[in-house]
């Protein structure tokens, strides 16, 4: 099976070398070439078109956003943004997503063995996910490749007893999970929500600090309040809480009130935050008082959790294949029989509101 060919574009020789080593460690990936700036990258693309490009946003001669804009308007190629964790960098990274980048990953740093290993998992998985994105003209079938242990939600929260039931309350909670393509999908979903909608808790696979910028941007364009979740934040009507990057978020309950807990821990389904962790905690503490939604994304994070929510009495929705950027997570949930409804992206919010009233 042909390997996915990756073009690395970064002005730092150290970063190019580090990324080359990370990518080369995965048997399904190969480094087609490296380039120190977009001009050299354009020359290499003219000779051979890569399957995926990793792109820095701050470079000499031409910045990454300008280069991305040219790629997407002339010859769309899946692009993974690899950026530093700075306030300006996160704003630029969010703009890159608006211009068509598929994923954002933080630059690897040589801090600890665990950090290096997690960076390797995230970068390689992001490249593979990008190869499936609909911006590509041709797809290469890639078999799943497991790097290191793949922890389930058990690593954070044990499964609830199957006979556990929650007392019905007047408040509903909407739990939402998304990954590749999720920034656009969540924007569509949340912009349709009225100010009296049920409280919403979201896991979007995204690095830390980027979730702050993402939440702030959504808060500006939505009628409801959108914020990055903090530990012990209450789940309120007319508000959406987005899990902070690099932290799992769990739904908890005190009496009839719901709140969230942010927690460190291992990668679950190769992600932190993990959709499965949110969905499992929602099944345990909300039961039939919840609605679960799984959106576009690569892999299977959230599929088992959505099934647990359904088994606990929650109503569940999966985004349909046609409207997904990557039909991975919803597909796996549907295969498990976890979805009551399969609907297009623009119909998810109306369906949630209909279920909330019924």
Image (cartoon, rainbow, N blue to C red):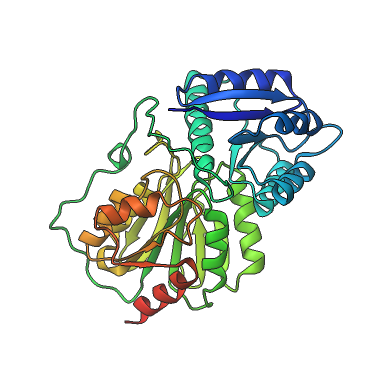
Rendered residue at 63%/30% (across/down):
107
Residue 339, position in %: x, y? 30, 62
Residue 141, position in %: x, y? 43, 38
Rendered residue at 53%/19% (across/down):
24
Check the image and report above or below for 155 versus 354: above
Residue 355, by quadrant, is: bottom left
Left or right: 60, with 142 as reference point = right
Q: Closest to the observer: 335 or 289?
A: 335
Rendered residue at 30%/39% (across/down):
152
Rendered residue at 32%/77% (across/down):
170
Residue 309, by quadrant, is: bottom left
Left or right: 310, with 225 as reference point = left
Check the image and report above or below for 345 versus 27: below
Residue 212, position in %: x, y? 61, 51
Left or right: 71, with 246 as reference point = right
Check the picture and name the quadrant holding the N terminus.
Answer: top left
Check the image and report above or below for 165 versus 238: above
Residue 87, position in %: x, y? 71, 43
User: Is residue 136 among the parts visible in the rendering?
Assistant: yes
Check the image and report above or below for 177 versus 345: above
Q: Closest to the observer: 199 or 233?
A: 199
Among all residues in the image, which is located at the extreme right? 61
Check the picture and name the quadrant holding the C terminus.
Answer: bottom left
């Amino acid at each position: 099976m042909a390997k996915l060919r990756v073009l690395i574009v970064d002005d730092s020789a150290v970063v190019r070398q580090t990324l080359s080593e990370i990518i080369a460690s995965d048997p399904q990936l190969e480094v087609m070439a490296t380039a120190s700036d977009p001009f050299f990258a354009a020359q290499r693309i003219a000779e051979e078109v890569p399957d995926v490009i990793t792109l820095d946003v701050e470079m000499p001669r031409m910045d990454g956003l300008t280069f991305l804009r040219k790629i997407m308007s002339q010859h769309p190629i899946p692009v993974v943004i690899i950026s530093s964790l700075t306030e300006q960098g996160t704003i630029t990274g969010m703009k890159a997503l608006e211009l068509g980048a598929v994923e954002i990953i933080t630059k690897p740093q040589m801090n600890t063995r665990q950090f290096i290993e997690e960076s390797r998992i995230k970068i390689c998985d992001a490249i593979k996910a990008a190869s499936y994105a609909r911006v590509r003209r041709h797809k290469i079938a890639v078999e799943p490749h497991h790097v290191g242990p793949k922890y389930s939600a058990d690593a954070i929260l044990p499964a609830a007893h199957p006979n556990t039931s929650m007392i019905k309350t007047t408040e509903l909670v909407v739990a939402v999970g998304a990954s590749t393509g999720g920034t656009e999908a969540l924007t569509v979903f949340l912009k349709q929500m009225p100010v009296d909608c049920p409280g919403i808790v979201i896991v979007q696979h995204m690095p830390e600090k980027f979730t702050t910028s993402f939440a702030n941007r959504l808060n500006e364009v939505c009628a409801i309040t959108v914020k990055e979740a903090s530990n012990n934040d209450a789940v309120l009507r007319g508000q959406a809480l987005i899990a902070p990057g690099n932290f799992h978020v769990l739904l908890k309950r005190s009496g009839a009130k719901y709140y969230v807990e942010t927690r460190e821990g291992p990668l679950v389904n190769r992600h932190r935050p993990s959709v499965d962790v949110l969905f499992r905690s929602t099944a345990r503490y909300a039961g039939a008082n919840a609605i679960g939604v799984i959106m576009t994304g690569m892999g299977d994070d959230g599929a088992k959790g959505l099934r647990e929510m359904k088994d606990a009495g929650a109503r569940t929705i999966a985004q349909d294949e046609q409207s997904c950027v990557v039909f991975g997570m919803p597909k796996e949930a549907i295969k498990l029989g976890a979805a009551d409804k399969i609907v297009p992206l623009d119909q998810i919010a109306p369906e949630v509101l209909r279920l909330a009233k019924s």
